[in-house]
Image (cartoon, grey):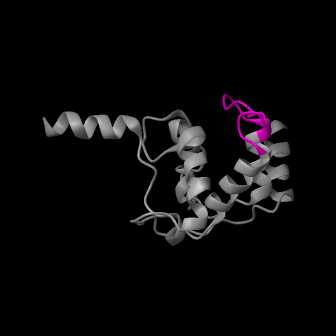
Amino acid sequence: MRLILSATAVLALGVGVATAQQASRSGPAAPELEHGKAVYAHWCAPCHANSMGLAGTNSLTIKYQGTDIPGVLEDRTDLSAPIIAYFVRNGVAWMPPFRRTEISDADLAALSAYLTAPLEDRGAHTPLLADEMAEMEAAR
């Protein structure tokens, strides 16, 4: 029953059918998306970045296995601003809801603009501190 309600809510918010796109991006995000990318890097990337050791990425990869929907949020093309706002403000499973004192409405709008922009405008994946540390260790 809970699954049916969740699926209905997603459809009601206009998520629609996902279309697969290549997630090969490089370079910086478009200037108007930089603030949203910074919000993503601070609040979302620790669980949802392009790394299979992360809880959010793992759970979404498993959830969407066998579909064209990627588990990495930065690679998604099916998200809408209302669905992003819903999950940011309400949370889901072990993802906490974020208060307006954590992610302001302006930050949420910037995050939504970033995650709904065309992939080519988003630039490269947000680097993780752990990735940077691993690269430095490997360079030693």
Q: Position of residue 112 (x, y in %)?
A: 69, 56
Q: Specify the quadrant of the image occupied by residue 20.
A: bottom right
Q: Position of residue 29 (x, y in %)?
A: 50, 64
Q: Position of residue 128 (x, y in %)?
A: 41, 41
From this view, report whether residue 45 is shown above or below residue 65: above
Residue in front for this viewpoint, 101 or 123: 101
Point 60% across, 39% down: residue: 43
Relative horizontal placement of residue 16, taking residue 19 as reference (left or right) = right
Q: Is residue 93 magenta?
A: yes
Q: Position of residue 34 (x, y in %)?
A: 56, 58
Residue in front for this viewpoint, 21 or 63: 21
Query: Which span is picked out in magenta?
Result: 89-104
Point 53% across, 68% down: residue: 30
Relative horizontal placement of residue 25, taking residue 114 as reference (left or right) = left
Task: Examine the rendering and report whether any part of residue 55 can be seen.
Answer: yes
Please identify the quadrant where the N terminus is shown: top right
From this view, report whether residue 107 is shown above or below residue 89: below
Q: Is residue 16 magenta?
A: no
Point 40% across, 65% down: residue: 27
Please identify the quadrant where the C terminus is shown: top left
Task: Examine the rendering and report whether any part of residue 66 can be seen.
Answer: no
Question: Majority secondary structure of the magenta segment?
Answer: loop
Point 77% across, 33% down: residue: 99
Relative horizontal placement of residue 12, taking residue 26 as reference (left or right) = right
Residue in front for this viewpoint, 66 or 133: 133
